[in-house]
Amino acid sequence: MKRSILLLLAGILATTVSLAQVTGRRTIKGLQSPESVVAWKNGYFVSQMGYAPDPAAKDGNGAIAFVKGRKIKYPRYFNDTLHVPKGLTIIGHTLYVTDIDHLKGYDIRNRKKVFDLNLEDRAGMLNDITPANDSLLVMTDSFKGDVWLVNPHSVTMKRLGNIPAANGVLYNPLTDELYVCSMGPDMNGKGLLWHRKLNVNGDVFEPVKNSPTGLFDGIVQLDSSHLCLSDWTTEIKIKQGPKYGTLHVYDLSTGDDFPVLVKQSPADIALDKRKGLLIPVMLNNTLEIWSPEETESIYVPVITGGKPGTASAPVDRSH
């Protein structure tokens, strides 16, 4: 009897906290197929693939928006032709963006293009990108499956491996661990989470222990023990139209996977400077900005008062 009462109270408390946290979520409307997002000072840059986007069409419909507060302050921050911009990252004052077969860099201060690596003869569909340090980038090619280490200063590239439909990429400099999540062979929704050491010569990509499976897009590190992957898998299973996507919270220490239902089409997720989750909801043309408390609730047990990095298992909730 006592156990039943405790479980009931825990459920009520979890629901109450969850509802309270949802009210703090901001939703930015009016974007055009948002794919990736990166925080910058008091706002966010968002890559827009354009209306009715074709992932490989050079149609000039893409743009980088700047969001501040609760609105789109600049729908086209840089005055340059972009087709289907996807991954975004920032080193110093330079914003880097992948656009089909080009890696471009823009000076945020003067809005000028300062870098353009033409890979028309080597790339299929460049996708996600992340910094390895203050001068190196790791970049994925979803069509060819290649994972590249890029030095934009010397304009050189090194192939780190090949993963079928490689997509989201993340590097942890504290552990030298490089993670890549994929969409699966022929983008069939049987993608895995892969890892390797970046600075160990000869190391190769292997699936993590008990890897979750899905049509993965983005990946972030929530704390030292948990990764979060965005998954479109439910999209391709629903014949009458998409309803939900999934966030997979993966426990690095145990290999456990905790799915959390979210809105349809969660694309290349990111974290802001307060560790709040940023979710471009591509098919809804919106950007969701979660509070740090709401983000924390998906991997820290609320009823125990746990803190990030100490939780043994996250709370599984639907939003």
Image (cartoon, rainbow, N blue to C red):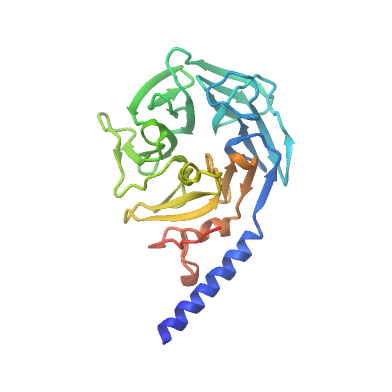
- Image x and y of residue 26, in percent: 67, 51
Q: Quick one: quadrant of the C terminus?
A: bottom right
Q: State which quarter of the image contains the N terminus.
A: bottom left
Q: Seen in the image, is 278 located left or right of residue 299?
A: right
Q: Quadrant of residue 283?
A: top right
Q: Looking at the image, which residue is at 62% across and 30% down? A: 52
Q: What residue occupies the far left of the structure in this picture?
A: 202
Q: Is residue 190 left or right of residue 58?
A: left
Furthest-top residue in view? 121
In the rendered image, the residue lying farthest to the bottom is: 1
Q: Quadrant of residue 172?
A: top left
Q: Residue at x 68, y 28 (%)?
A: 109
Does residue 115 appear in the picture of this structure? Answer: yes
Please, which residue is most extreme toward the front here?
240
Q: Position of residue 140 (x, y in %)?
A: 43, 29
Q: Position of residue 308 (x, y in %)?
A: 46, 59
Residue 220 in sight from this viewpoint: no
> In the depicted view, which residue is nearer to us: 220 or 307?
220
> Left or right: where does residue 102 sit relative to residue 199?
right
Total labels drawn: 0
Q: Is residue 114 above or below residue 130?
A: above
In the displayed structure, 62 sits above or below 295; it is above
Q: Residue 75, image x and y in percent?
A: 71, 32
- Name above or below for residue 25 compared with residue 34: below
